[in-house]
Amino acid sequence: MLTEAGSQAWWIGAGALAQALFGARFLVQWLYSEARGRSRIPRAFWYLSVLGGAILLGYAIHRDEPVFIVGEATTLLIFLRNLQLLPRRSSRR
């Protein structure tokens, strides 16, 4: 049987693995976009991702949850980079 400390360590490890797997899908998308020189997902998706990611990062910091802090900070950087990769809107319509 796990002790309380052992149980805590197990859950932190499980959380880190889950965050890594969840974040890997954005890594795959990011590398795909970088290879093509542009983002392949609509601009609104990235704005919502940045907003949600920033709020979740604030929550993770408030809760002092290291797994979520690292995960959210990393994905937030990827979200911002994807916004940079989107083509600039033309002033002509």
Image (tube, rainbow, N blue to C red):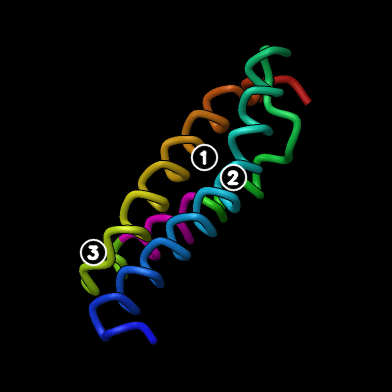
* Picture coordinates of residue 90, whole percent (x, y): 68, 20
Mark 1–mark 2 Cα distance, whole angstroms, equals 6 Å
* Residue located beneath label 3 in the image: 61
Disc 1 residue type (three-letter): Phe
Mark 3–mark 2 Cα distance, whole angstroms, equals 22 Å
* Residue located beneath label 2 in the image: 46
In the image, taking residue 53 as reference, residue 28 lies left or right, namely: right
- Foreground: disc 3 or disc 1: 3
Q: Are marks 3 and 1 in contact (CB under 8 Å)?
A: no
Quadrant where the C terminus sits is top right
Disc 3 residue type (three-letter): Ile
Disc number at residue 79? 1
Instruction: Determine whether 34 is above or below 79 in the image.
Output: above
Q: Which of the pair 62/67 is nearer the observer?
A: 67
Q: Residues within 10 Å of mark 1 (few under 14, many from 20)?
A: many
Q: Earlier in the sequence, mark 3 or mark 1?
A: 3
Secondary element at image label 3: helix
The stretch in magenta equals 50-57
Disc 2 residue type (three-letter): Trp
Q: Residues within 10 Å of mark 3 (few under 14, many from 20)?
A: some
Q: Are marks 1 and 2 in contact (CB under 8 Å)?
A: yes
